[in-house]
Image: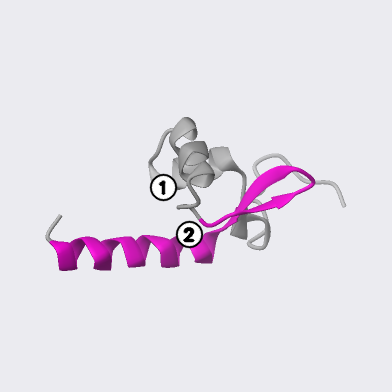
Amino acid sequence: MKREYGEKKSPFRTQIMTPKEAAKYLGLHLITIYRLIKKGKLPGFKVGGQWRFKKDILDAWIVRKIKKNSRTGD
């Protein structure tokens, strides 16, 4: 099935993000994404040697960070 110009991506495709897409979604620089991955602080997984991120897991990660920061007063 050919994709028409201007057609939106399927909802399923937007659930899995590349590091570049995750950086844009989180408002971070791409290098910061890779630093967080290296430190084990950002939840992601590899597919064929390339990092991918599930949107709902990133959303949960954000919520945990917000709760942690509000408890510590940071």
Q: Is residue 46 left or right of residue 42?
A: right
Q: Residue at x 53, y 42 (%)?
A: 38
Q: Indicate how the structure is coloured in the image.
A: one colour
Element marked by disc 1: helix
Relative to residue 17, is residue 59 drawn left or right? left
x then y, percent, for residue 53 = 59, 54
| Residue 26 numbered mark, or none | 1
In this view, the residue in front, 38 or 13, is 38
Prevailing SS of the magenta stretch:
helix
Residue wearing tag 2: 58
Whether label 2 touches label 1, CB < 8 Å: yes
Around disc 1, counting alpha carbons within 10 Å, would you say few (fewer than 14), some (14 to 19), or many (20 or more)? Answer: few
Between residue 69 and residue 20, name the one nearer to us: 69
Residue displayed at 64% across by 42% down: 6
Write down the region rendered in magenta: 43-72
**Coordinates of residue 55 in the picture (x, y in percent):** 53, 60
